[in-house]
Amino acid sequence: MKPDPGLYDYLPWDARPRIEWPGGARVALWIAPNIEFYEYDPPPNPQRKPWPRPLPDVLGYSTRDWGNRVGHQRMMRVLDRFGLRGSVSLSTAMCVHHPEVIAMAAERNWEFFSHGIYNTRYTYGLDEAQEREMIEESIATIREHTGQHCDGYLAPALSHSEHTIDLFAEAGGTYTCDLFHDDQPTPVRTRSGRRFVSVPYSLELNDTIVYVVNRIEPRRYGQMIKDAFDRLYAEGERSGTVLCVPLHAYQVSHPHRLRAFEDALDHICSHDRVWKATGREIARHFLDHHYDAFVAAAQREAA
Amino acid sequence: MSLDPRFLQYPQRRHGMDHDRYAWSMLETRAPIAWPDGRPLALWINVCLEHFPLDAKGEGFKAHGSMTMPYPDLRHYTLRDYGNRVGVHRVLQALADHGLQASFAVNGEVAVRYPSPLRRIAATGAEILGHGWNMDHVHFGGLDAARERRWIADTLAALSPYAPGGIRGWLSPARSQSSHTPELLREAGLGWCSDWVNDELPYRFETAHGPLATLPLPLELEDRFVIGENLHAESEWADQCIDAADFLHDEARALGAGRLLALNLHPWVIGQPHRIRHLERVLAHFASMRHALWNAAPSAIASRAHPALAIMRPERTLPYRAQAPRSGPLP
């Protein structure tokens, strides 16, 4: 085990090259709906139980299935209203189980990136070859079912190994969503030396963390998103920032929750200097325009 | 270190579900449901009457609300018992004051221990649902089928005096099932079950003995979950109920498709004197929507939504009178 993941350099918030987003935007906003499949009876992982109750865990399973049966369509209507495209964090088995959901996202020109095959198959315990097989299969499934190149990765159920990011970079990916250390994209060091970045994906504003872990009230969640946006918008005048709102239809789309989220989007979208982007677009823009300057700045900081 | 190869095999990866309990479908792509008189929103209020034994064994797992302190856990035993002594009367009064009807999901042991509130409820003609024997008899994966069959039969036997029209619906303690619960419910003559929270409208659920209907009863809006597990303020819970009603009403109008608001209540939570007025605010809001609401019994809602399942009574039913109600813990 390592005391530090060694993936990125320290770069002080007040000593960075300026990030300029397209159109002079202050904030790059991206919405990341997780479209997931949780298995009824998954093979048990030695390090993490998929369900808290003895199988069948009807409550856990059916809570998540609600998102696929009810939640996605409702969430899509809200995002459509604001002209927001999702960047889908995809359990790629969804392409086989529920291609109807994938078709609705594809019709909207949403981005798809890999979130593993099932959200009940964890990385823990996989050897490097096994993890590579899982990652490559998920990328191939996205290509086969959507025609898209998979640029991003969020490890299934946020379960990682020391090799996860290296393996994804070697499989042709360009960005990771697994790191929460910053409000701007960051160059990420991989063993292959490929140009690879972290795109901020928020854990604090992730609806599942908000509702399941932190047990926050729906209207307060809406207020948290507004507050985060206001601060990033103000600071984005100096250098562009990123606001990501990760979603799960089985949480945010409930009738007692969705309107508070919609109110937050209403607030954000009433501002004009917002770049409504996808994860891939943010990663590419940063790689094309700011990556080299950030690497050089980090080298100066280290020296 | 590596994992067994089956961890990278996906034998259930196929179109639809990874089990055979129900067909895959999305709510908005189904044929719209029309409630009576063109009302956009059906309202089902359910009240759970539960008994939490002092000598909880926690077999399978302990339901939320069960004993947590070293024996004898008088604090939690009596706080739960409060619901059946005091809370239920406040809830019944609040419903009556607002002219709203509810169903009652009742542990069999509650009916044996406390016939008085059951008589009062039966006199209103409210629908009674089976809710398992008590909250320490969860139907967990691995439970022996013969024991589970007996728990279901004893529960229905204890409740049947208060349900002259018969018992058609079921809510398992803690919404937990074993792998054969659906078969046993169907075998016992039940027509629908609310354990699965994966939808907002009734749908067909398969068992080896024929279909059941699932009538979803959301977990994440119920008083016990929001107040008891999330620890939200009572006023916040009331806001959430009101937001849900308004949201579903508006969606039903916008899409021209009936929606269902199902609200689950626990007198041991919401019947406390500092909480009941928040329920009253929710009920007052429902009452103010009266012309848009179809406030109905759950079996009526399930039958309306799923005429094909309106049988709701398989031919085979258990002779409920054959087994005397018991008050002690079951084997």
Image (tube, coloured by chain):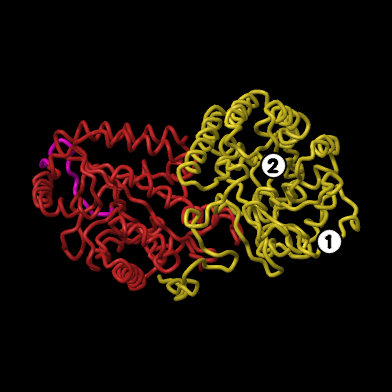
Asked whether the residues under the numbered discs 2 and 1 touch, taking CB atoms below 8 Å apart as contact, a structural biologist would say no
Task: Point out the tag, 2 or 1, that comes first from the N-terminus.
Answer: 2
Residue A57 circle label? none
Q: What's the CA distance linking mark 2 and mark 1?
A: 33 Å
Q: Chain of mark 2?
A: B
Q: Which residues are magenta?
A: A5-18
Camera-nearest residue between A229 and B136:
A229
The amino acid marked with disc number 2 is Met
Residue depicted at 48% across the width and 52% down the height: A70
The residue where tag 2 is placed is: B67
Question: In the image, is residue B181 part of the stretch drawn in magenta?
Answer: no
Chain the render paints yellow: B
Q: Quadrant of the C terminus of chain B?
A: bottom right
The percent position of residue A251, horizontal first and vertical second, equals 46, 46
Chain the render paints red: A
Left or right: A264 as drawn, with respect to B319: left
The percent position of residue B165, horizontal first and vertical second, equals 82, 49
Discs 2 and 1 lie in a common subunit:
yes
Residue depicted at 42% across the width and 36% down the height: A260
The percent position of residue A228, horizontal first and vertical second, equals 30, 35
